[in-house]
Every structure is written in structure tokens, then in C-alpha cells.
Image (tube, helix red, strand yellow):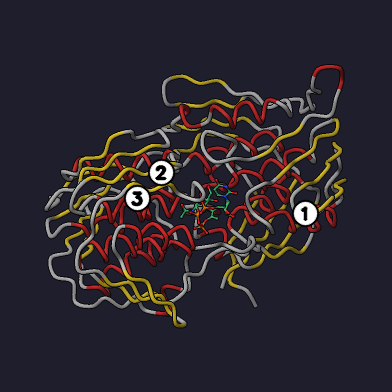
Amino acid sequence: MYKYVVEGGFPIKGTVKASGNKNAALPCIAAALLTDEQVTLRNIPDIEDVDVMFQVLTRLGAAVIPGDSHGEYHITAHDIKTSEIPVDLSRRIRASILFAGPMVARTGKIILPPPGGDVIGRRRLDTHFLALEALGARVEVDGVFKLTSNRLVGVDLFLDEASVTATENAIMAAVLADGTTVIENAASEPHVQDLCNMLNAMGAGISGIGSNILTIRGVKKLGGTDFAISADFMEVGSFIGLAAVTRGELTITDAAPQHLKMVKLGMAKLGVHWETEGSTIHVPKGQSLRVVPDLGGMIPKIDDAPWPGFPPDLMSIIITLATQAEGTVLIHEKMFESRMFFVDKLIGMGARIVLCDPHRAVISGPARLSGSELVSPDVRAGMAMVIAALAAEGQSIIQNVYQIERGYENLASRLQSLGANIQRLPTG
Ligand SMILES: CC(=O)N[C@H]1[C@@H](OP(=O)(O)OP(=O)(O)OC[C@H]2O[C@@H](n3ccc(=O)[nH]c3=O)[C@H](O)[C@@H]2O)O[C@H](CO)[C@@H](O)[C@@H]1O
Ligand SMILES: C=C(OP(=O)(O)O)C(=O)O
């Protein structure tokens, strides 16, 4: 168990390379189960969630061998020895649900203890099972989820919500089904697109990638591939937020700016700007953060939505940013029920926030923040606390950093290389 000890109040400065997208790496790792040939994945981030996914793959019988370069892994799922996902691993991450689609498609069976993950509200799994049932899987729920199937058959699916991981599970089952599947109201985030592109490189027949209607022509067999994960736009957005609140100067390379169009619009409402050159983003120093009112001087709103809307995983970051911007803004988190509760910690540091209900907060800034004792409830609130601590005067101690490091690669050392005063120390 580790904690961060942070001395705030200093601008960050330097260059950082964006890591691979966690939410793309996780389904792509699970998708390696869909073939008995070798799959090489590149740009896989070195984070806790990936480590757990690899442990599950290994327990299922796959070989996972690190390659020569950072983030490169060779995975071969030649023989799958068991259909049971170990309970200790399943409950550590939400993404363990991503084994459902590939295991049912490849072996016709999975026994999956309830997945774990962030404490950000009820996280329904209904869409996953409705989709897999429609494709021909039998679902039994008895403490664990047991899915079995003799044959998956292509079907027309209209998802009851554009769930990211449910779409990914449906895709991974449909690629090996008999016939054609059409998924309407599909999620289309960059990570869903990465998964589809990887599967097509393995021989799958997916069209409509990037839209909310996917057509999947089932094939008999998939082969190996060599595929690079795209940049983590949640990490990039977090680093931009950090540079802006500390009035620092930051260059982010390999940042996939094409994934940040709505983030740019959202952050511009708080006066944050950056420049783009190719795949590099440059955040200029000393930005004056100021809320830009809507027409007629009205209070603006920043709200999240499925892609291409403002990403829910950056709401905690933008809340912290808003505490440092002059003016008033409404933040409306529509997708998760409990993601906003961490704002009481920011209020404790001096932020001026009215939490209207679990989904809406009115924030007036700028507020002077003071260092505090904090516990990270989830990966993004944890990162938001790190950002607040680096903007605050004095020392903060952040506990439960496991919940941050499951999504941010080598965070403390990368922040140190940007001049941040942050130490990662054992608790106790
Ligand atoms: C491993 C992974 O990829 N995790 C991501 C994935 O989780 P995950 O796939 O679990 O999230 P879902 O897309 O299923 O749903 C997220 C939340 O949004 C709500 N919802 C969803 C779709 C919709 O049209 N309307 C709506 O309100 C759901 O009820 C739920 O509360 O997508 C989430 C939403 O981008 C991200 O926060 C997670 O980081
Ligand atoms: C909620 C998140 O992750 P997960 O779905 O893996 O819990 C996140 O990345 O913000």
C-alpha cells in the first residue's frame, strides 16, 4: 500500500509522452483469446488494470511474454485450460467483464464472479447479458455469472444504452458467430474503435467503425496480429488540466489530439487553451483561467455524454479545474450516480462548490486551496486530488493510490520529471 505526499503551489514544466489508452488496452488484451495464434500488442500502459488482465489470461492458460520495447507484449492463447475467472482477480477490476464475450465465442463457456472497479455508483451489467443472450448465450446468475453457448448466431441488436464495455463484449462474441450481427446504439469511443480495428486486422468483418451502427460479418476463425493501442485521451486531458491549474508549461507527445475535440471545447469554457502540432500538444504557461459565459452573460454548463460528448472520465478533472477559474460554472455529470461525491474533499481544501444533487455541482472560482489529507475513491477522483494537491498551498497526503495507479502509468515519477514535488511512499 502506498500514499503520495505532495507539496503544492509550484508550476509544472516539461515534456511527457502520452501512455496507451487503458480502456483500449483492456478489451484488446481480452480479444487475444479469440485466436490460437500469436497476438502482439504495443503501447500497452504499465498500470494495475493491465497487470490484472494479464494475470487472468495466464490463469486461463495463455502465454503472455513481454517484448523488447516498452509496452510490447506477445500473447498466445493456444489452449484454454479453464473457463473460470478467479474470484480474487475478477473483483479487482471492472474490466474482468470483458472476458465474457471472447470466452463464450472461443470456448462456449465462462464462469465470472462479479467484476469490481471504481466506487462511482451502480454499474449495471444488464446490457452485456442482454446482448450476449440475443447472440445465443445462456446466462445464469447465482452469485457468479455463468454463460454457456453451443453456437452463437448473428442477430440484429439495439442496445438499451450505448455501454462501452457491453458494446465491446457484443462485438467480441459476434465476430465468431454464424451470420451477420448489426449493433445499433453501439458505443463508438476511440477505445471501441481500437478494438474493432484490431479485430479486423485479425480477420474479422466489422464495418461502421466509429459510428453507432456496427455491422459484423461473423467468420469461422481469427488469426494473429500486431496492433498498437492509441493514446490515452483521459491521461492527456488530465495532464492538460494539471498544467493549467499550476500555471505550468507542458508538452505532450503522441497525444492523439483528434480524440480531444470535445475536451478542447469544454476546457475552453474555463479559459484553458493549447496548441497542436501533428500529434504533439503544447499547453502554454501562465494561462489566466476565466469562465466564458454563455450568450447574454449566462452561467455556462459542462456536461458529459457518450462519444463524441465530453468524456465522463474527465469530469472529476474539469471540476478541479473549475475551482481555479474566475467565474461560475455548472458541471452536470449525467452518466454516473456517485462520481461527484469526492467534491467534499475539494470543499475541505477551500474550493467553493455547491453540490446540488448527485449529478450537478455549481462551482465558483478561483478559490485558494490548502493542502489536506485525502483518500482516493476512484481513479479519476484520485487524479483530480493529485491535481488539486499540486495547485494547493502546503502539503497533502493522498491515500489509496492503488485506485489512481490502476489507470495512470508511473504517475509519481512522471510528475517528478515535470518538476512536481510528489513522493510515493509506503503507508504506515
Ligand atoms: C474499462 C472501460 O472501458 N471503462 C469505461 C467504460 O465503462 P463501462 O463500459 O462500464 O461504462 P458504460 O458505458 O456501460 O456506462 C457508464 C455509465 O454511463 C451510463 N450511460 C451509458 C450509456 C448511455 O448511453 N447513457 C448512460 O447514462 C451508464 O448507465 C453508466 O452509469 O465506459 C465508461 C463510460 O465512458 C467509462 O467511464 C469507463 O472508464
Ligand atoms: C471508471 C473508469 O474505469 P473502469 O471502468 O475500469 O472502472 C475510468 O477509467 O475512469
Mark 1 lies on residue? 343
Residue 370: x %, y % from top left: 83, 52
Q: Residue furthest top?
A: 296
Which residue shows up at 54% across the image and 41% down it? 306
Q: Check disc 2 and give the amino acid type.
A: His
Q: Is residue 428 above or below residue 202?
A: below
Would you say the residues marked 1 and 2 are in contact, meaning their CB atoms lie under 8 Å apart? no
Q: Would you say 47 lies left or right of 182 here?
A: right
Q: State the residue at coordinates (21%, 43%).
A: 217
How far apart marks 3 and 2 lie (CA) works out to: 13 Å
Residue type pointed to by label 3: Ile
- Dot 3: few (<14), some (14–19), or many (≥20) neighbours within 10 Å? many
Which quadrant holds the N terminus? Answer: bottom right
Residue placed under numbered mark 3 in the picture: 44
Residue 410 location (% of width, % of height): 48, 54
Q: Quadrant of the C terminus?
A: bottom right
Q: Residues within 10 Å of mark 2 (few under 14, many from 20)?
A: many
In this picture, is 76 found above or below 217?
below
| Dot 3: element | loop
Establish if 97 lies above or below 241: below
Question: Residue type at mark 1?
Answer: Val
Residue 398 left/right relative to 253: right
Helix, strand, or loop for circle 2? helix
